[in-house]
Image (tube, grey):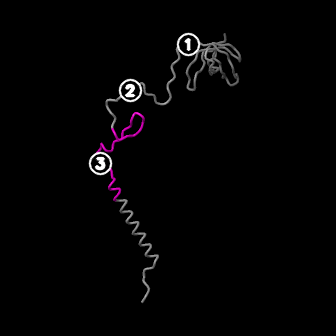
Amino acid sequence: MGKSQETFGKKEKEKKKLKKRQDKEQKKEERKASSVKGQDVEEMFAYVDEYGNITSTPPDPKRKKVVKQEDIQIGISRQEDIDPADSLRKGTVTYFNTSKGYGFIKDHESQDSVFVHQNAIEGTIKENDKVTFEVERGPKGLNAVNVKVY
């Protein structure tokens, strides 16, 4: 009698292949069973409740709140415009670099530091001068314009 042509290694490889094939078929059947194809459109909807949680139940129309479009804020809130009557202010020059042409004025009322450029100055100023100025909103904050020594 001769030895069998199938060795132990070959038998194990065949078992693994068969097991993989069966697992693949089982997963395929599970996918078919839980498939969303053919479901009603209503079953696929998801809703967001007032707390931001996703739910499957639609919201109650009796609890609906009306929101004005103007009340919705996206990003940072807008800063209020400056009243023209308050635009003439008094302050002290805390820093001014004549070679670079800019400096800062400390506002007497709000104690805010306001940027000033030499193009906005009428005459010449230096540090510790008392000045009157108007404020203008620039891209990076408040800018002083029409700066005069008093």
Q: Earlier in the sequence, mark 3 or mark 2?
A: 3
Question: Does residue 27 belong to the magenta stretch?
Answer: no
Q: Which mark is nearer the camera, 3 or 1?
A: 3
Question: Which residues, given as a range, are shown in magenta?
Answer: 29-57
Q: Which mark is residue 39?
A: 3
Where in the figure is residue 34, as x and y percent of width and height?
Answer: 34, 53
Q: Secondary structure at mark 3?
A: loop
Above/below status of 140 relative to 59: above
The quarter of the image holding the C terminus is top right
Above/below status of 90 relative to 66: above
Residue 111 relative to residue 79: left or right: right
Q: Residue at x 50, y 24 (%)?
A: 78
Residue 99 relative to residue 32: left or right: right
Q: Earlier in the sequence, mark 3 or mark 1?
A: 3
Where in the figure is residue 63, as x and y percent of width and height?
Answer: 34, 29
Disc 3 crowd rating (10 Å Cα; few below 14, some 14-19, many 20+) is few
Above/below status of 98 relative to 61: above
User: Residue 73: which quarter of the image?
Assistant: top left
Which amino acid, mark 2? Val
Residue 123 relative to residue 30: left or right: right
Q: Secondary structure at mark 2?
A: loop
Which amino acid, mark 1? Asp
Q: Which mark is residue 86?
A: 1
User: Residue 113: which quarter of the image?
Assistant: top right
